[in-house]
Image: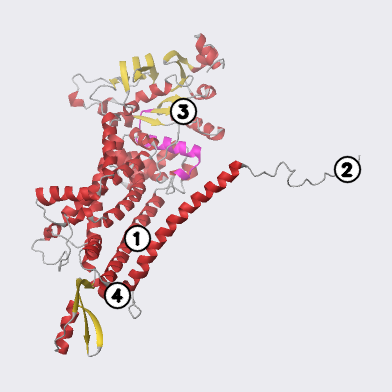
Amino acid sequence: MSNIVAEPLSPEANPLFGKPTKAKQIERYAFWAFRLGTYFILACAAAIFLNIFYKGGQTVFQSQFPFVNVEFLSESPQTLHVFEYEGQSYEMSDSRFRTFKEETGATISSDTYAYSGGGIWPCIVGTVLLVVGAMAIALTLGVLSAIFLSEYSRPGKVLNAVRLSILNLAGVPSIVFGIFGLGMFVLAFGWNVSLIAGWFTLAFMVLPIVISASEESMRAIPQGLRDASLALGASKWTAIRTNVLPYAMPGILTSSIIGVARVAGETAPIMFTAAYALRDQLPWEGLERWYDIFFQGVMALPYHIYVVSAKIPQNEYTSRMQYGTAFVFLFIVAAIALASILLRIRMRKKYRW
Amino acid sequence: MSLVTDKLVPSPKLEKPVEAPEATDKSRSLIQISNFDFFYGDKQALFDINMDIVEKEVTAFIGPSGCGKSTLLRCINRMNDLIDIARIGGGEISVNGVDIYDERVDTIELRKRVGMVFQKSNPFPKSIYENVVYGLRIQGINRKSVLDETVERCLKGAALWEEVKDRLDTSGLSLSGGQQQRLCIARALAVEPDILLMDEPCSALDPVATAKVEELIHSLKERYTIVIVTHNMQQAARVSDKTAFFYLGKLIEMNATDQIFMSPEKEQTEAYISGRFG
């Protein structure tokens, strides 16, 4: 028998080579639509971040040693004086301007720009205090109620209603929480504009996120672990404490990262409850009793951005302040988020299954 | 040896203290189930179950899926309490003479005496050591010498000691399936139960691991009363002294294992074990 060598088929005749069909055409268009949508979002995010990094970087960093603008990070906001003296032009914050006047002994007239000199140290301190306190309250209350909802409550209409109202709470505008905090904590409880009023207002705002995420992570723990604990003579709470909570903690922390960003960033809830536009003392200065620290207002980064951008006359000097503050703010939120991610990774390593 | 009565019911509250019969009689029944009905919501899962489970014997529950054998097993240490819609229709289960559904019974004390091994091996995501001592730690026992001694005794008891003694601090989840199941048995032994309930302990294991667990069941029989639910009839024949056959929530027949497998009294039993249905 002679070997029959098959003639190579032309690409058009080969049945394995696909033919362009309408479905493929549509798929290509759809694919490009998805791709363009993603690129568009990326471009917007990049534009925002680069803008803030570029303009804010000019305020925060400098070309000479120590390369970071120490005055901006370590002093309070002050009025900026812009003046000419002996043919040279100067920009000085209020305190330096006074020393300069004393040293030279001259009477100098200057243009003044409110909030454009000095730094934002009190705002950094205030924001960190607000975030730490509010998250501590939100996590405590949120985890407690999530334990109740996922482990103790009976499924039924009441539970569904509770879940629904928690979800709805997540959609309430933050200014509503601000007004609630004003009415409840500032006025009714008589806490005035204070750190503690801000803590509770912010905590209530993020509670829905914390509760639903904690509940989800607890429900993801296999029922077998609870059963095994109970079968070994654990009470329900012991089983939860030793075999549900530790393993749900990484998930709870993940949700708290979103919470941190919201707590740090929201302006409306603290506007009436905790934030001062300007305060010359740091929170721990001038206290009569130790617990007075809870009952005083603080400056905060988002509120400072709002004040500098919306409450005072705009000029080239205020915009430096705005971008610098936004830069530092983004940096702090990123740092806190990074810390919780690292903590989560460590916990995951400890309890791997 | 007083088994369950001493702590299960707080004694001062008992009006008539239950006298634990002395364990002289070798075939004393430890678990008595009488006229027991059980419901999930409106659906009746168990119908009028009557049986005696004898001390230091292996009793196997067999029957097709959904026949109620696991449900009955979970009633013996009240694990069904965790299911909201589950309720008892009537009758009682008593362990060593105490009605375990008496409202004074503390489920924690009950479950310490009636241990359970689950179908799916479920070691805690902790070290082997911590897995075994979990039952002691939650009772507040933290003395290192006691814990060390318990770990060695229980792992030896569960025929796992030789395989893991050099890596007690590695995760229980790093073990193979059969080892995990034996770890779960060791963990159950640590609280020193009188009764060990096993819910299809070998269903997820390969034949070699199954053989090891079965061997273990044989050796545990000397000290513990074992109730095992199994789908595998050869397994029931190999490990058990008594076998109970369930069908549609009813106890069809219970007898010595040889009797059940060689000459069952009921036709349904015969049909099931000869593989004609189920």
Residue depth check, mark 2 versus mark 3: number of the one nearer the observer: 2
Q: Earlier in the sequence, mark 1 or mark 2?
A: 2
- The answer to whether one can see residue B54 in this image is yes
Dots 2 and 3: beta carbons under 8 Å? no
- The answer to whether one can see residue B138 in this image is no
Kind of element beneath mark 1: helix
Q: What colour scheme does the image use?
A: secondary structure
The CA span between labels 2 and 3 is 62 Å
Dots 1 and 2: beta carbons under 8 Å? no
Kind of element beneath mark 2: loop
Which kind of residue does numbered mark 4 sit on? Asn
Residue underneath mark 3: B200
Residue underneath mark 1: A334
- Residue shown at 34% from the left, 55% from the top: A340
1 and 2 marks on the same chain? yes
The numbered dot on residue A3 is 2
Residues rendered magenta in the picture: B173-195
The numbered dot on residue A69 is 4
Q: Nearer the viewer, residue B206 or A278?
A: A278
* The N terminus of chain A, quarter of image: top right
Is residue B114 within the magenta segment?
A: no
Q: Provide the major secondary structure of the magenta segment.
A: helix
Q: Nearer the viewer, residue B51 or A135?
A: A135
- Residue shown at 45% from the left, 36% from the top: B121
Q: Is residue A350 left or right of residue A314?
A: right
